[in-house]
Image (spheres, grey):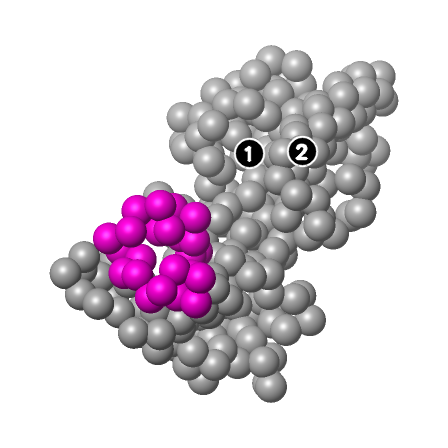
């Protein structure tokens, strides 16, 4: 959430709860945003094509520049390596030091380290003028390429368009993570902020008006906020279901099991 977005939502809340100081309202908004995205899990991000190094266990999950600060990873929803699912029992999500700061990492457990290297830049540099041997191509996606070479008399996959389209391999490590804004700095993707600002607003009002020890305690407004927030939370969860509706792989990896 940008400063202007935060200020606009704060002003909307102050119009309904004028007794609450602006600084408190800002704190309630940040708390409500973190709570909403934690409960809905509607904010997901795909870290795609991470180079795999043989024998290396730790891989940084790097955000784009706009998301470097103010974002937390709640959990890894699923990971794939060269298009093949990586079991949740094979890795951990960790928060490790990086220079003077910290970053999130997928860490393979001992005994499950990658056995082959996949360098995305090398893959992209393949040339149609080159004839590739089995050892050259199979390290990217062994099952697909072995089948291709055996069935089609070792035709060059780059120049044979039909075979290439059938067997395009997914490169490297792909990770889908569930995100949350940090309470301190609180970045939220603009599209999600625009879509769910009302849910966050009602969540903030619910929290502030339910605090009995504060002068802005208001059980009637809190009851209204509870209904409004519950409705928008249900809609967010419904949207999350729709994200999985047409993808069989995501159905299989959905951790809640309600698909």
Q: Which residues are magenta?
A: 148-173
Inspect the magenta stretch and tell me whether residue 170 lies in it.
yes
Question: At 67% from the left edge and 66% from the top edge, which residue is drawn?
Answer: 88
Q: Which residue, as the protein is rendered here, is positioned at the far front? A: 153
Q: Nearer the viewer, residue 208 or 236?
A: 236
The residue carrying pointer 2 sits among few (fewer than 14), some (14 to 19) or many (20 or more) residues within 10 Å by Cα, namely few
Query: What residue is shown with label 1?
Result: 26
Question: At 72% from the left edge and 41% from the top edge, which residue is drawn?
Answer: 39
Residue 234's place in the image compared with 213, above or below, is above
The spot of residue 242 in percent (x, y) is 66, 30
Q: How many marks?
A: 2
Question: At 43% from the left edge and 48% from the top edge, which residue is drawn?
Answer: 166
Inspect the magenta stretch and tell me whether residue 162 lies in it.
yes
The label nearer to you, 2 versus 1, is: 2
Secondary structure state at the residue bearing disc 1? helix
Query: What residue is shown with label 2?
Result: 245
For marks 2 and 1, give the CA distance.
36 Å
Q: Nearer the viewer, residue 150 or 228?
A: 150
Secondary structure state at the residue bearing disc 2? loop
Visible in this render: residue 135?
Answer: yes
Question: At 63% from the left edge and 53% from the top edge, which residue is drawn?
Answer: 77
Q: Earlier in the sequence, mark 2 or mark 1?
A: 1
The spot of residue 74 in percent (x, y) is 62, 54
- Left or right for 205, reference 57: right
């Amino acid at each position: 959430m940008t400063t202007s977005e935060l200020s606009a939502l704060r002003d909307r809340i102050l119009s309904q709860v004028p007794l609450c100081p602006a600084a408190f309202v800002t704190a309630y908004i940040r708390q409500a945003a973190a709570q909403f995205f934690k409960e809905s899990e509607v904010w997901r991000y795909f870290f795609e094509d991470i180079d795999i190094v043989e024998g290396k266990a730790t891989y940084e999950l790097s955000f784009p520049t706009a998301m470097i600060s103010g974002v937390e990873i709640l959990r890894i929803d699923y990971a794939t390596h060269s298009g093949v699912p990586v079991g949740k029992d094979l890795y951990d999500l960790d928060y490790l030091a990086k220079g003077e700061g910290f970053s999130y990492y997928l860490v393979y457990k001992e005994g499950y380290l990658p056995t082959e290297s996949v360098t995305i830049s090398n893959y992209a540099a393949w040339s149609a003028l080159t004839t590739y041997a089995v050892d050259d191509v199979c390290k990217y996606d062994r099952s697909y390429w072995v089948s291709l070479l055996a069935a089609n008399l070792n035709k060059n996959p780059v120049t044979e368009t039909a075979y290439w389209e059938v067997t395009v391999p997914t490169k490297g490590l792909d990770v889908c993570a569930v995100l949350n804004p940090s309470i301190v700095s609180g970045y939220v993707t603009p599209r999600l902020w625009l879509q769910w600002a009302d849910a966050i607003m009602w969540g903030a009002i619910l929290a502030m008006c339910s605090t009995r020890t504060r002068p802005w305690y208001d059980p009637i407004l809190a009851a209204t906020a509870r209904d409004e927030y519950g409705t928008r939370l249900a809609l967010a969860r419904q949207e999350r279901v729709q994200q999985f509706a047409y993808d069989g792989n995501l159905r299989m990896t959905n951790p809640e099991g309600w698909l």
